[in-house]
Image (cartoon, helix red, strand yellow):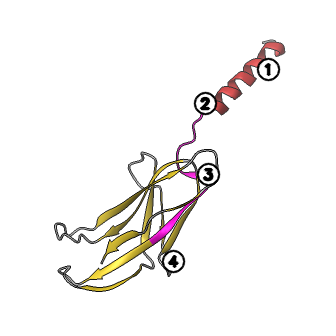
Amino acid sequence: MNKKILTPVLLLLLCAVLFSCKKEPGPGGKSTIYGKVFCKDYNATFTVLEQEYYAPETWVYIIYGDDRDYGDRVRTNYDGTYEFRYMRPGSYHVYAYSKDSTLQSVADIAVIKEVSVPKNKKADIEVPDIVIFN
């Protein structure tokens, strides 16, 4: 094939690949999603609040976009803080597990916060406290 024809064709294919790939929510960006997990510690029947505190060593999960499973997880610090760094623009669900205060389930339930990272700029997104029961 002639070099005069091959070079433009290759450039056209390269441009199509570079500009057609849409980056999905997830790691690889410039933004940070952060917050705290707050725990309300009740007795077994949820009738007496025994103590309240920011929860250390608690797993916090993040779901990227419309994924069905979590994409990453981190443990909270001693003061209940967590952060997910280098997030791309898009929608996320951040959650931690809690006991069911209604006593309808013996299994833990997810306490979910929805978060959006805006397009075209670096952002630090603070998630409202995730309140869990223990």
- The disc, 1 or 3, on the residue closer to the chain's N-terminal end is 1
Q: Which residue is mark 4?
A: 77
- The disc, 1 or 4, on the residue closer to the chain's N-terminal end is 1
**Which label lies toward us, 1 or 2?**
2
Q: Secondary structure at mark 3?
A: strand
Segment tinted magenta in the rendering: 20-36
Say which amino acid is labelled 2: Ser
- The disc, 4 or 3, on the residue closer to the chain's N-terminal end is 3
**What numbered label is drawn on residue 28?**
3
Label 2 crowd (10 A; few <14 / some 14-19 / many >=20): few
Nearest the eye: 16 or 89 = 89
CA separation in Å, label 1 and label 4: 54 Å
Say left or right for 8 vs 72: right
Q: Residue furthest bottom?
A: 50
**What numbered label is drawn on residue 70?**
none
**What numbered label is drawn on residue 20?**
2
Q: Secondary structure at mark 4?
A: loop
CA separation in Å, label 2 and label 3: 18 Å
- The disc, 4 or 2, on the residue closer to the chain's N-terminal end is 2
CA separation in Å, label 4 and label 3: 23 Å
Q: Secondary structure at mark 2?
A: helix
Nearest the eye: 1 or 29 = 29
Q: How many marks?
A: 4
Label 4 crowd (10 A; few <14 / some 14-19 / many >=20): some
